[in-house]
Image (cartoon, rainbow, N blue to C red):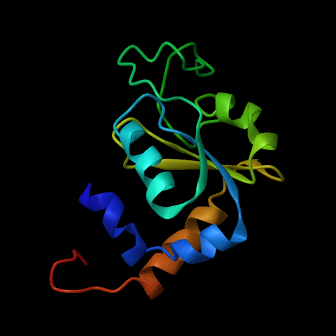
Amino acid sequence: MPYVGDLAAVIDIDCIRSAGIRMGVDPLGGASVHYWEPISVLYGLDITLVHSVVDPTFSFMTVDHDGKIRMDCSSPYAMAGLVELKDQFEIAFANDTDADRHGIVTRSMGLDESKPLSCGSDSYLLTHRPIGRNRRR
């Protein structure tokens, strides 16, 4: 998978690996489910996939305040399952079903609703990521 192989070009994988962080990941039944195990294996990261089934019915999801299912990673309702597991990991991530949004859960904060961790990640990528001819700006 070219995406998995290229991650080390944009993320300091050695730093993450040397920190020995235990990470949980919930792809929320969607597109990223088949990426997390290869990432874990290739880079030697301690990643636990908490749901590994692609489920187009989203039967595993908790319902939102109005009884509807929403795949919004910033919603405490959508993230309730991962928040329940927060003490098992130093940090946990969820991707929405098409993997263009993410939610972050930590032991100390639970769901990161204010997005300071996301802002820090974005800042790191923008200041440390090499931009070459074959990369989008």
Q: Of residues 73 and 35, which is closer to you in this image? A: 35
Estimate the x, y position of residue 50 in percent, counting from the top left: 59, 33
Estimate the x, y position of residue 76 in percent, counting from the top left: 66, 35
For the image, the number of numbered tags is 0
- Above or below for 118 versus 63: below
Q: Residue at x 48, y 26 (%)?
A: 70
Q: Assign the C terminus to one quadrant of the image.
A: bottom left
Q: Which residue is drawn at 38% across and 32% down?
A: 30
Q: Of residues 126 and 135, which is closer to you in this image? A: 135
Q: Which residue is drawn at 65% across and 65% down?
A: 116
Report the side of 82 relative to 34 (left or right): right
Residue farthest left in this picture: 133
Estimate the x, y position of residue 84 in percent, counting from the top left: 75, 31
Report the side of 85 relative to 17 (left or right): right
Q: Of residues 54 and 37, which is closer to you in this image? A: 37
Q: Assign the N terminus to one quadrant of the image.
A: bottom left
